[in-house]
Image (cartoon, rainbow, N blue to C red):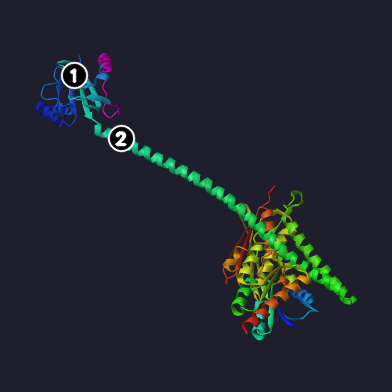
Amino acid sequence: MLHHVLIIDDEEDIRKVIRQQLSGTHFEILEADGAEQALQLLDENVLTVDVIICDVRMPRISGVDAVDHFRRKYPHTPIIVLTGFPDLDLAVAFMKEGVVDYLVKPVEKEKLVEAVENAANRRRIFESSSL
Amino acid sequence: MQPQEVSEKLLRLAVHASPSGILIVDRTGRIVFANPALLDMFGYAGDELVGRLIEILVPDKDAEAHRRHREKFDARPSPRDMGRREYFDAVSKDGRIFPVEIGLRPGEFDEGQMVVATVIDITQRRQSEDRLQRHEQHLEELVEERTGELREAQIETESVMEKLIQSEKLAAIGTLVSGIGHEINNPLYLILGMGEAIRDEEDHALCREYGEDIVKHCRRIKEIVRNLSQYARPGAGHDLQRVDLNEATSAAVLAAKRSLGSDRIEIRQNASPVPAILAKAEEIQQVLFNIIRNGIQACGEQGTIEIETSHRDGRASVRIRDSGAGIPLSDVKKIFDPFFTTKGPEHGEGLGLYIVQQIVTKYGGIIDVVSDGGTGTTFSVQFPVADQT
């Protein structure tokens, strides 16, 4: 089954690596360079986006604010935070906020794929239970 | 009217009506006259005191000393004025001891040598003085107590400040470590990703491309580490040179203009002669370059940067004001934090102002920033001037 993954990171090279790590699997990738573009893509593809991967430090709207916004507007879309900050407090805060995973870069391909699959399954279970 | 013209009757009236006690004592110490005020003061009536030794008015404890003193006085009589603030204890008929002040005026009269004594009951004055003294003592105690409290408060404040500085240092280290983690983890992730891609890729050309990326990101990490270590070290004295802030400013402006290719921003320099400072010229240029570059970026499409040098109280200063968007109040405290940035990754790692602060502090300087969202930002950098010799 094809999963749609939205990658939000202001650094193009990082988006490229994430895309690469998820390539060759059953993921369809959407990319945004910040929260504004991500919201636009979500509005257009809300029914198809299965998982959001979001960076924390971004110009204009930070990952913290972006996650808060996504959780309120799209509460059933699982979010994975992927950041360079090895910060336990930040991780706990995000988990409390409802993100499904907090991954610290550098993350290996297998681990990222597993995390995205878990998140996508969560979405699927939720959808099937609400039908 | 002269005293000799005053009638005896009038003088008697004056003595009789005087509020002070008046006493006349002969050379044997016997009382020959006491006016009503004195009788009233000591609780005697009529002629009760006449013919009695003066020691009847002196408490027993002082009587013998008084007698000796009186004999000495008799041998060499001399006046003693009132108001000398000498107190004596006196005793009333009913045994009440009270303080008095005494003035003495010896003289030869028809009746022989006599001493006229003026006596004032100073009980109330003494009480007032005692009260005043107690009050002063109380005030002194209060001052002492308050001073002690202030001293303790100061010690406590110093201790809290020390802890605060320590915790600020720890917080700064925490921010630094977290920032370093973030900045290094990002390129590390890119290197990891490219490594995985090379592992899984068979196309040699693509592998080569990924290899190039790995080299690029390794260089990025190297640059971050170099920046951090270079500016954290204190300057070695023998490497320092005399730096003219105006020359350093001009060089920084030139570099900023070149690097940004900006001709939409007007840079005005108002250079006053300032004494040299002792530093590494390239580091001072970097300080000014970083601030000017930030100002240019803050101006966006167009704006003005005003740079002014001045000299006051042994310090040479540069003030750089931009007409840009300003820094929100919530960000002003963070701008010197390592890796704090409001700009995208293409504008660097957020080390610019951190480096500025490190360099300025290293040379004993002070950096100050004033900004209010929307009305531009002013950076002031001050350095101690070099010894003129």
Image height of B102 relative to B303, above or below? above
Q: Choose top left, top right, bottom left or bottom right for residue B178.
A: bottom right
Q: Which residues are magenta?
A: B64-87
Q: Is residue B194 left or right of residue B122?
A: right
As helix, strand or loop, the secondary structure at mark 1 comes to strand
Q: Choose top left, top right, bottom left or bottom right for residue A72.
A: bottom right
Residue type at numbered disc 2: Glu
* Chain name for mark 2: B
The numbered dot on residue B129 is 2
The numbered dot on residue B228 is none
Q: Choose top left, top right, bottom left or bottom right for residue B111.
A: top left
On the question of residue B244 being in view, the answer is: yes
Residue type at numbered disc 1: Val
The residue that disc 1 covers is: B25
Image height of B85 relative to B278, above or below? above
Image location of residue A121, percent across then percent down = 70, 78
Q: Is residue B8 left or right of residue B232?
A: left
Residue at 78% from the left image edge and 64% from the top image edge:
B221
Are the residues under marks 1 and 2 on the same chain? yes
Image location of residue B53, percent across then percent down = 18, 17
Earlier sequence position, callout 1 versus callout 2: 1
Which of these two is toward me, A81 or B189?
A81
Q: Is residue B78 magenta?
A: yes
Residue at 13% from the left image edge and 31% from the top image edge:
B17
